[in-house]
Amino acid sequence: MSTYQEIVDREQKFLLNTYARYPLAIARGKGVYVFDVEGRRYLDFLTGLGVNALGHAHPRIVKVIRDQAAKVIHVSNLYYNEYQGLLAEKLCTASGLDRAFFSNSGTEAIEGALKLVRAAGHAVGGPEKSVVIALDNSFHGRTMGALALTGQPKYRKDFDPMLEGVRFVPRNDVEALRAAMDEKVCAIVLEPIQGEGGIQESSREFLQACREQADQHQAALIFDEIQCGLGRTGQLFAFQHFGVTPDVVCVAKPLAAGLPLGAFLAKEQFAQHITPGKHGTTFGGGPLTCRVALEYLAILEDENLLERVRRVGGYFAQKLHEFVGKFDIAVEVRGVGAIQALQLNIPGKPVMDGALANGLLINVTQENVLRFLTPFLLEERHVDKGVRILRKQLAAAQKQAKAEKKAAAV
Ligand SMILES: *Cc1c(COP(=O)(O)O)cnc(C)c1O
């Protein structure tokens, strides 16, 4: 076994310099906890960026991975396998959509959805019908198509030229949406709750306006539920929480409990425009990942986890609201269920660092938003424990901010 420092030094020498990692090397996990290479325990309020919804080492997930790995892991999409169709059936039935395509990641689900809506657009309106409306402050992934839909300059800079034909509008701005629509639009794409953008929710009125505008212009409404979907809101699909049904929905993060699997689901009206040869993948939809995803969905039902997400998420929200009353630096609570945030008016990094040093994993987006993507297994007692750690860190950060202000004034 390597020491923490050996692990860090090796990565810094040999890996592409893509990540400013937090100072933690994780060796294993159990339930809502992870353990570092020195055996210290951390409460996990980030779940590998929304992936480990069932926590770590769930016995049923371990069992199906063992069993399926010994049978067959990969067959390619040249052949049938038992589990891809079963998983598609389950997701289509639960969403009310008609057909699924399986990818290896969220960004690939977005890429596939983008190809689908362009093909459908061209079929009804010719090659001109290819414009996609996306939202400011969005995040849809890092490949060129998904990046072109991502309305944050920091992710796009250095990589121009982008894919043509994307128009951005501000979230919840119905007038701007209407003004951006015309016969060239083939799709509107949005996250019902922007994740990386700081846990920013769309209003029901805005989502309804998107639904109406898409219908009026023969365009597809695509929901990117890669972060907020598959149970995080307390409903299986985030669109069920908002009561507006999209034509296409993209999911990924928790789908195969940590194995790479994404999907988009589409209504037949759009899905029919993809025929053999137009899209595909080598790895996506293999028997191992699909069987694990079926187990993930079965566990949500058997353990009644969506009910738990709603209950414990409500309890956590209440505690976060108490912080807003107590600390001047805490200004707003956003989100629902297992996707929540505390907006600060100072940088969140010292709070995150302090939480890590005291055994709690969270992260910061947009400089001053503390983001919580909690495991669905969370119980009230875990919330209490996390809140105790957060309270101490918020108090320390507030004290520091006040001292700095005072020093600047003299
Ligand atoms: C994470 C994320 C993606 C990209 O998914 P990858 O699996 O990292 O490719 C796309 N959209 C949203 C909303 C995400 O949170």
Image: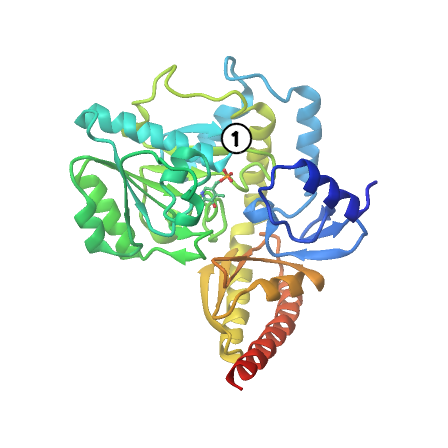
User: Residue at coordinates 56% horizontally, 34% vertically from top-left?
Assistant: 293
User: Residue at coordinates 81% horizontally, 46% vertically from top-left?
Assistant: 3
Seen in the picture, residue 350 relative to 338 is either above or below; the reply is below
> In the rendered structure, which amino acid carries the disc numbered 1?
Asn
Judged from this view, the residue extending furthest toward the bottom is 410
Q: Quadrant of the N terminus?
A: top right
User: Residue at coordinates 25% horizontally, 56% vertically from top-left?
Assistant: 173
Seen in the picture, residue 248 relative to 173 is either above or below; the reply is above
Left or right of residue 90: residue 183: left
Residue 154 % position (x, y): 43, 49
| Residue 115 found in image quarter | top left
User: Residue at coordinates 53% horizontally, 66% vertically from top-left?
Assistant: 347
Answer whether residue 228 is visible to the viewer in this image. Answer: yes
Q: Which residue is mark 1?
A: 104
Disc 1 secondary structure class: loop
Residue 312 % position (x, y): 56, 61
In the foreground, 241 or 179:
179
